Amino acid sequence: MRSFTVKSTTESGLLVAITVIMALMAVYLPVAGIAAAMLWPLPVIVLIVRHGMQYGVLSIAAAAIIMSIVISPVSAVHMAAAFGPTSLALGYGFHRGLSASRILLYGLAASLVGTFLTAGLTMLLTGVNPLAMTEQLAAMKEAAAASFQMYEAVGMDPQEQARLQREFMESMDYVMLLLPVVFLLSGMLTAWLNFAVGGKVLHRLGHQVTALPVFDEWRLPRVILYVFAFALIGLYWGTTRNLELLQQLSLNVYVFSTLAGFIQGTAVLSSLTRGRIRRWLFWLIVMFIFFNGFISQLLAVCGLFDMLFDYRKRFGRR
């Protein structure tokens, strides 16, 4: 018993040290810091699977205390609030041996909780609500207007300048409308990344963990197709009847369901081309499709209808 306690304490100390190092990377390294921040929950997940939830909670508290000393209290609280819930949710799911879909769902919900916790703390400390980007958008528009005035001073055609400025302002408004789905996709990316990397790490450590199916076999819920249809109807009603809230909600749902269709369409394409072209070439083609508006939309629609018709079963190799 004493040996187990010593081992648990030693591993906890080591993994807490790793979380602090990753936090330092997130703060001080511009590129690698992004990956370090997104993977910050990983050591806590490993600790929960190996020694239980209580060690995970204590490790987050210990890491926050150390980070407040070596970095700053504000950064420590923000890091713990943003990624602590995700760590606990994914660690719990792996520890209990839940299905991959449930683990990811818990991770997504916890990631969104972390986002709102961070926003609440920021508002409490600074009085600025980071989820209400009206003031930030206004400042960015003012800076952009000043930049366009500089273009006019160097001799840019006034009509061309006005067109570019109008398009830029419209794109900024469009980004504001899509803010909810941006937060949702960010949470999904954080949950999936820690699930995927955490599963591989735990497997290397000798743990039997739940894994996602092979990408060729990914099938998203059929309800996404119906949600996509309702989003189109909502966009029409919101635009024609000037219902701004309905328009924004429908636009966010439309973007989310289209992205889901693109993922499923890519899975269909991957299954049908498996063994016919090299994988690096396949992913290069997918990148080209993603950045081509018309073709990516076409692939997304195919993916959405695959949820209903299952093209892999109909046209796959027998």
Image: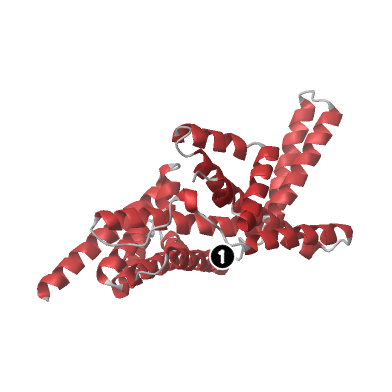
Q: Residue at x 32, y 59 (%)?
A: 43
Q: Residue at x 23, y 59 (%)?
A: 206
Tell me the crowding category of disc 1: few under 14, some 14 to 19, or many 20 or more residues within 10 angstroms, Cα based. Answer: many
Q: Quadrant of residue 309?
A: bottom right
Where is mark 1, residue-wise? 119
Q: Residue at x 16, y 66 (%)?
A: 7
Q: With 155 as the anchor, is 13 left or right in this view?
A: left
Q: With 83 as the anchor, is 316 left or right in this view?
A: right
Disc 1 marks which amino acid? Ala
Q: 88 or 133: nearer the eye?
A: 88
Q: With 241 as the anchor, is 155 left or right in this view?
A: left
Image coords of residue 269 (percent x, y): 55, 42
The relative height of residue 107 versus residue 310 in the rendered view (above or below) is below
The relative height of residue 269 versus residue 212 in the rendered view (above or below) is above
Outermost residue on the right side: it is 241
Q: Quadrant of residue 151?
A: top right
Image coords of residue 111 (percent x, y): 49, 64
